[in-house]
Amino acid sequence: MPTERPPTVDPIAAARWHEGAPAVSPWLHEEVARRMEDRLQWIRQAPAAWCHWDAVRGGLEGHRLVSARYPKAQCYVAETSRAGRDAASRALGKPWWMRWTGGQVHLAMPPEAAVHMLWANMALHMAADPQALMAQWHRALAVDGYLMFSCLGPDTVKELRAAYADMGWPPAGHAFTDMHDWGDMLVQAGFAEPVMDMERITLTFATPQRLLQELRELGCNLHPHRFGALRGRRWREQLHDALRQRLTCNDGSGQLSLTFEVIYGHAFKPAPRVRVSPSSSVSLSDMRAMLRNGPVNE
């Protein structure tokens, strides 16, 4: 289980992408959000407050689905990029005459231990330091609150990776983390009872140009050994030819297919545990939780 930053993610490139990513909700993100929202039917306790982490990239239609499921819950929309904050304000900010109807929406980071559900759709696989991100989510959740997240897994665009390797080009993208490693990292971040599962979605495209357009909306290559200079027109033609040769479906449709592995995760924030040692420290929010619930020693 990795204990440091993902080895194939360039943190400078990841930060640049995060700030410059299109402030839109890609189709695949919306589809994954719809599937993840359907899983909420198995959770009996409706949250009094929830947080949507990076809602614009995560899916604005998905946001509306969750809001409709929990119409009385307060919602914090935690956008971590300037473009995302501006887009969320335009899309989700209520006019003054509607602010007293339904659950209140706060376009801000939630206070510590303020929410009972944190919703993070399709964000983790683009994070240079996912464990630090999990720690932020853990701090925002109240005791017994839960995390719902999704991200891309290792088999994502395996056809494209193979095409690049066959052509002798540098890696097509950074490596995505396996769901079992995500589960281990959740436990390390203080979560309990992580439940992970996965599905594969195959998308088809009429042309290489359309396929590449979709990939540009979804993310970018964060691998430290990606090609470091500008590509020429001749290389782009080679890329289009390689995609036609290697990604065309065998059903005679002429469509190009790509596989996306989607990982879903769910975990609870348990009551804080105090380790028995000569000197121990706990945060103020954890102390309040222990006073309400009683401390658990280990």
Image: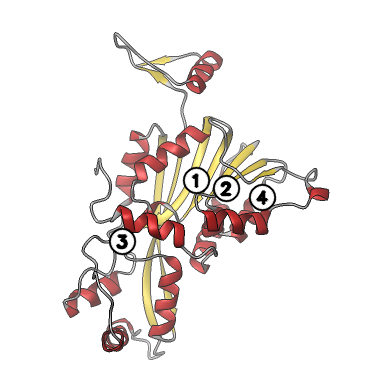
Mark 2 against mark 1, which lies toward the viewer? 1
Between discs 4 and 1, the one toward the N terminus: 4
Q: Quadrant of residue 213?
A: bottom left
Disc 4, SS: helix
Which residue in the structure is indicated by mark 4?
67
Q: Residue at x 40, y 60 (%)?
A: 17
Mark 2 against mark 3, which lies toward the viewer? 3
Q: CA distance from mark 4 to mark 3?
A: 33 Å
Which residue in the structure is indicated by mark 1?
148
Mark 4 is on which residue type?
Ser
Which residue in the structure is indicated by mark 2?
40
Q: Look at the image and tell me in which quarter the C terminus lies.
A: top left
Residue 66 vs residue 122: left or right? right
Disc 1, SS: strand
Between discs 3 and 1, the one toward the N terminus: 1
Q: CA distance from mark 4 to mark 1?
A: 14 Å
Along the line of sight, the residue nearer the viewer: 38 or 241: 241
Which residue in the structure is indicated by mark 3?
222
